[in-house]
Structures are given as C-alpha cells and as structure tokens.
Image (cartoon, rainbow, N blue to C red):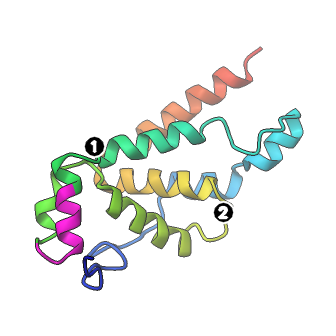
Amino acid sequence: MSDTSKAPTAPAGAEWKPVPLLEKIKKEGRVWGDLAQQYGVENPEPPWKTSLEGICEALGGNPCDTSTKLDQKWLDGQVDRKAVGDAAPLPALERRWEEDELSETIYKDVPFPERQLLALAHSLIKRGLVKEDELASRLKQVHQRLTST
C-alpha cells in the first residue's frame, strides 16, 4: 500500500483568481434542475454530463499510459510534480484536486454538476488550453443556435 501522506491537498502554487466569464456564468447561468423542470425533462443528469466526464478522461490521459504512472509516483513522493506536467494536458489527480479546491472556494455556491463544469473550465483557462474570449464566442454561438426559431 502506498503512502499518500506526501501528496498535496491542492496543486502546488495554485492561485485561484476569478475568471470574469465564469463569474458571469456563475451569477447569471441556470442550473440543470431548473431547466429540466421548465422543459419537462425527467432525467436527473444533464445531457452534457457524459461529455464532461469524457473530456476529463481524455485530458487526464489513458489510465495505462505514462502520465498515470507518473501521477502515482508523485503521490508516493518518488518524483517531483514537474515530471508529471507535460505527460498529460491536465493530469487526472491534479484536475480532481483543483476541482475540489475550486468547489470549496470560488464555486462553493454553485450546485453540482454545474460546479464541476465551471471548475474544469477554470482549470483549462488557467493553463491556456482554452482562451476565455474563445469560450465566450463559442457560448454565444451555441446560445444563438439554441434560441433561433
């Protein structure tokens, strides 16, 4: 059994600053429960939930690949976190720690699963994998498509 006491409870050097676009979504967005009720949908899971989980898996890398092995070595204190950094765009363990920390701070007032979605977007923006202005543009396109008649 490995000793995980050396693992950080949050990513080293994490500085959580609000992202203006995500703050706007947090304040003005609607949660799945309300939307489902409005449109008579009985499924308790939002339709985007499985896509979100798939994205998280893809960003974290294959469970059998080098990034996961490095994550485990990091947890065991055998390797510095920098060795894990480039192995996957967003290593699974780091994403989970970031999600937990963001859920307890910036997004604590947002219900799950919307909180998970905002935390992932925040992590992607922080790493430069997604640009805030590009995400805003894409959200606008999707909104226009959904509200057009």
23 to the left or right of 34:
left
Q: What element carries label 2?
A: loop
Quarter residue 59 falls in: top left
* Image position, residue 108 (x, y; %): 61, 71
Residue at image position (65%, 35%) is 47
Q: Magenta segment range?
A: 69-78
Q: Bin the neighbour count of mark 2 within 10 Å (Cα to Cα): few under 14, some 14-19, many 20 and up.
A: some
The majority secondary structure of the magenta stretch comes to helix
**Which one is in front, 102 or 134?**
102
Residue type marked 1:
Asn
**Residue 8 seen from this side:** yes
Q: Name the residue under label 1.
A: 62
Mark 1 or mark 2, whichever is nearer to me? 1
Residue 75 vertical position relative to residue 88 in the rendered view, above or below: below
Total labels drawn: 2
From the image, which quarter does the C terminus lie in? top right
Q: Quadrant of residue 11?
A: bottom left
Of residues 143 and 57, the one nearer the viewer is: 57
Answer yes or no: is residue 131 visible: no
Say whether residue 90 is magenta: no
Between the C-alphas of marks 1 and 2, the distance is 30 Å
**Which disc, if any, is residue 110?**
2
Give the mark nearer the N terminus: 1 vs 2.
Answer: 1
